[in-house]
């Protein structure tokens, strides 16, 4: 398994799109969520939205971490008018670690980590695996990520403008 961590500067907002896949009858779950033992679901830094989960980095708060499956293949971090977008190829038929999560965000006082673990893979000694991320930086970005609609119109539009 490959695992890519990007350490983000303090003071920003991590943005994770929730899964959009649906079955014809919508009777089966379409989202995996992983929480670590030190994660408080009532933590005000985490917003559990209808379409997005956001995690605000706070230099005065302790650690927390969330993981999700993200079939859109991106996550973002907005900080001081700059938007970092991390794109990756989600592989829906593969098994991901930590309960099926291909995106994880961890924050503590000093920083926020934007993580994309690759699928679990068994390799022979001579084999190798790769995990490709594509990084994009947009600046200046005047999008306020204070609502789901603002994220959809601004941040999601930017994330979808690049592959």
Image: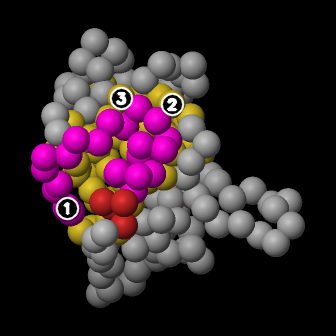
Q: Earlier in the sequence, mark 1 or mark 3?
A: 3
> How far is mark 1 from mark 3, CA to CA?
20 Å
Q: In the image, what residue occupies the spot 50% across and 41% down?
A: 148
Crowdedness near tag 1: few (<14), some (14–19) or many (≥20) residues, C-alpha within 10 Å? some
- Up-down relation of residue 94 to residue 74 (above or below): below
- Up-down relation of residue 145 to residue 6 (above or below): above
In the picture, the quarter occupied by the N terminus is bottom left
Q: Can you identify the residue that label 2 sits on? A: 47
Residue found at the very far bottom of the displayed protein:
126
Q: Earlier in the sequence, mark 3 or mark 2?
A: 2
Q: Can you identify the residue that label 3 sits on? A: 56
The residue nearer to you, when weighing 119 against 158, is 158
Is residue 72 covered in magenta?
no
Q: Position of residue 84 (x, y in %)?
A: 22, 51
Q: Position of residue 40 (x, y in %)?
A: 54, 21
Does residue 2 appear in the picture of this structure?
A: no
The residue nearer to you, when weighing 149 against 12, is 149
Q: Give the structural element (helix, strand or loop) at label 1.
A: strand
Is residue 84 rendered to the left or right of residue 91? Answer: left
Q: Pointers 1 and 3 in contact (CB under 8 A)? A: no
Q: Can you identify the residue that label 1 sits on? A: 136
Count of marks overlaid on the render: 3
Q: In the image, what residue occupies the spot 24% across and 68% down?
A: 134
Q: Earlier in the sequence, mark 2 or mark 1?
A: 2
Q: Quadrant of residue 28?
A: bottom right
Q: Pointers 3 and 2 in contact (CB under 8 A)? A: yes
Is residue 154 covered in magenta?
yes
**Magenta part of the chain:** 135-156
In the picture, the quarter occupied by the C terminus is bottom left
Q: Give the structural element (helix, strand or loop) at label 2.
A: strand
């Amino acid at each position: 398994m490959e695992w890519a961590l990007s350490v983000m500067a303090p003071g920003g907002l991590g943005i994770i799109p929730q899964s959009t896949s649906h079955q014809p009858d919508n009777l089966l779950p379409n989202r995996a969520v992983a929480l670590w033992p030190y994660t408080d679901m009532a933590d005000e830094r985490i917003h559990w939205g209808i379409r997005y989960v956001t995690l605000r980095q706070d230099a005065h708060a302790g650690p927390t971490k969330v993981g999700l499956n993200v079939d859109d293949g991106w996550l973002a971090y907005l900080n001081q008018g700059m938007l970092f977008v991390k794109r990756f190829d989600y592989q829906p038929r593969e098994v991901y670690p930590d309960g099926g999560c291909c995106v994880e965000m961890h924050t503590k006082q000093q920083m926020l980590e934007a993580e994309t673990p690759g699928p679990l893979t068994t390799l022979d000694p001579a084999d190798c695996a790769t995990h490709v991320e594509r990084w994009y930086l947009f600046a200046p970005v005047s999008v306020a990520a204070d609502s789901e609609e603002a994220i959809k119109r601004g941040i999601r539009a930017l994330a979808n403008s690049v592959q």
